[in-house]
Image (cartoon, helix red, strand yellow):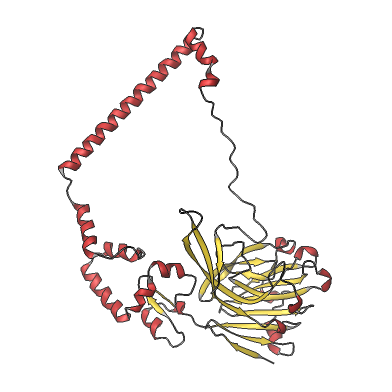
Amino acid sequence: MTHVVEDSDKYYTWCNFGPKDQRTHELWVDMSDVRHGQVRLHGILSNSYKQAVRVALSFDFPFYGHYLRQITIATGGFIFTGDITHRMLTATQYIAPLMANFDPSYSKESTVQYLDNGEMFVVQWERVRLSGKESKGAFTFQAALYKTGTITFSYREIPLSIDVISSAEHPVKAGLSDAFMVMSPSSQSLDSQQRTIYEYHRVVIDTTKITNYSAVEFTALPTCLQYASCDLCLSSNQTSGCSWCNVLQRCSDGMDRHRQEWLDYACSEESKHANCEDYSRGDSSTSSSITPEIDNVTSLTPLQKSCKNNDDTIHHIFNNANDVKTDSSTKSEGLVNTGVIAGIAAALLLLLALVLVALYINYHPTTASPLYIIQRRKSYWPSFKFQKQQPGYKEVEGEGHEKDNIAEAGP
């Protein structure tokens, strides 16, 4: 029986299908059928444990309103959709048909394979076994990402109830998640910044419905990010909570992967006190009173909390830049030039003295002074050694590239 779940946070609706539903068989992508496209068996993932590999997509895949052109396939039964791979790979930003502690390296029959035909991207974990519970049986399932934004999970072999799978060594999840990253000053160092990941939405599917020959189909809903103009952003009845940021020319509710820019440009404050008519009037008046060069500078600079937009200050800066040099500035430049000339002359005299000393030592090696200098060279003349530099690469761990100073936060 089909069960439709309405998402409370406006991103997806989804349906569960059981063994008796025809839709379950329709959603399963037969990887042996050449009509779907060329299937690639990934050698590293098929013979590794806790590994992840980044793969490029041949199309723009919309995920929570963001268009992705690459994803990361993990041996643990999920796809990571974030831009920065970090130690908390399993925490947020995932598409997980069945995230668990799978070890494809245990058996030669365990494989991770995928195909991309320009309309859909399918990953299949075939006959993979749980680490430490290999005797319990093999799992076969897949995730399909469609160009339209639809996501499907299909299951063929599920030998265990998901509820009994331990999450002690690896998280056990099924569903979707997305998050945004913001930068903040690090408490450990004044010069460094800490990245904090905020998970703003998660879809958790009912794991009791994950059985042999079952499926889940997610349908993407319209988001604020799809609107390219202020009028469409604020007038659409398909979305709610959308605001228009004129500086960024972006429609958003402020809770997406562009959160950092939304904060940097003070878009929340801007949208509270303006509407589309204000922006249109502002654009026409700006074009008639301000030169294009100045307009470009102000529109591309983030609004800082500690700074104020003062027109008098802007004009003052540009006027000073065009002023003719005063007598005092000319005098100071003359003093600088004199100092430079004197420094060059001193350096030439020092170089000439060193050359003369070297020539003297070379042609009079038996005299007392040169012999003394040569004998005492090790004591008084330091010898410089060039040490071999360590390589700049760090070992990539199973969960991906490590990034320091990353913290996770809840919604």
Q: Quadrant of residue 294?
A: bottom left
Residue 79 percent location from the top left of the image: 63, 70
Q: Quadrant of residue 287?
A: bottom left
Position of the N terminus by quadrant: bottom right
Residue lying at the far right of the rendered structure? 135
Does residue 292 lie above or below 372 as drawn? below
Number of marks in the image? 0
Residue 267 percent location from the top left of the image: 38, 72
Q: Is residue 190 visible?
A: yes
Does residue 184 lie above or below 115 as drawn? above
As rendered, which of 55 and 374 lies closer to the eye?
374
Answer left or right for 17 relative to 107.
left
Q: Is residue 38 visible?
A: no
As rendered, which of 67 and 164 lies closer to the eye?
164
Residue 127 percent location from the top left of the image: 78, 71
Residue 222 percent location from the top left of the image: 49, 82
Residue lying at the far top of the rendered structure? 367
Residue drawn at x 29%, y 32% as measured from the top left: 340
Does residue 292 lie above or below 159 as drawn? above
Residue lying at the far left of the rendered structure? 327
Residue drawn at x 25%, y 34% as measured from the top left: 337
Residue drawn at x 47%, y 62% as measured from the top left: 184
As rendered, which of 293 and 272 lies closer to the eye?
272
